[in-house]
Image: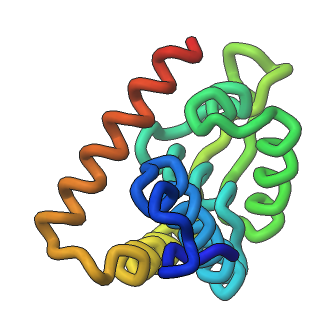
Amino acid sequence: MHKADARTPDRLRHAASWLINLASAHSQRLVSEGFAAAGARGYHYRLLAALDETGPSSQAALGRHTGIDRSDVVAALNELAAKNLIDRSPDPSDRRRNVITLTPDGTRHLHELQKVVDRIQDDLLAPLTPAERDQLTALLTRITDHHAKSRT
């Protein structure tokens, strides 16, 4: 991994895209390690969080809501179902479709994963004050929202 240090050309140390890439690489490592230690993957957290926020949902709607590819949604839901973290039941209005529901074990696991995510945020943003953390999050949200709109 590259470090933004004295060996990095000055123009890169002042290029937001370069710095975002460095921070992203560090963040991805923290997330991967944190979820692995909790016996989970990022997709698990995203799906459980979506179910917690929106309630029971179809697999297709979960994929759209989380931005996870359909085949990856199915594989991750299979893993979550095997651990009794979600329940799949036929949709009464369309028997060809399954409704995915968060189980009580799934809710507990989501709370455990939220603690992992909170620790990751604390580690990643350690050099920032609470106000700076809020500001950085707001700015990154503006950037990602802007570019998400331009892709649609």
- Residue 68 placement (x, y as % from top left): 71, 39
Q: Name the residue: 76% across, 32% down.
A: 98
- Residue 38 placement (x, y as % from top left): 64, 83
- Quadrant for residue 18, please give it: bottom right
Please indicate whether residue 108 sits to the left or right of residue 142 in the image.
right
Colour mode of the rendering: rainbow
- Quadrant for residue 132, please give it: bottom left
Vertical placement of residue 39 versus 25, above or below:
below
Q: Nearer the viewer, residue 134 or 10?
A: 10
Q: Which quadrant of the rendered structure holds the N terminus? A: bottom right
Vertical placement of residue 52 versus 32, above or below:
above
- Quadrant for residue 36, please give it: bottom right
- Residue 127 placement (x, y as % from top left): 28, 81
What is the number of callouts on the image? 0
Q: Nearer the viewer, residue 10 or 88?
A: 10
Q: Name the residue: 56% across, 65% down.
A: 22
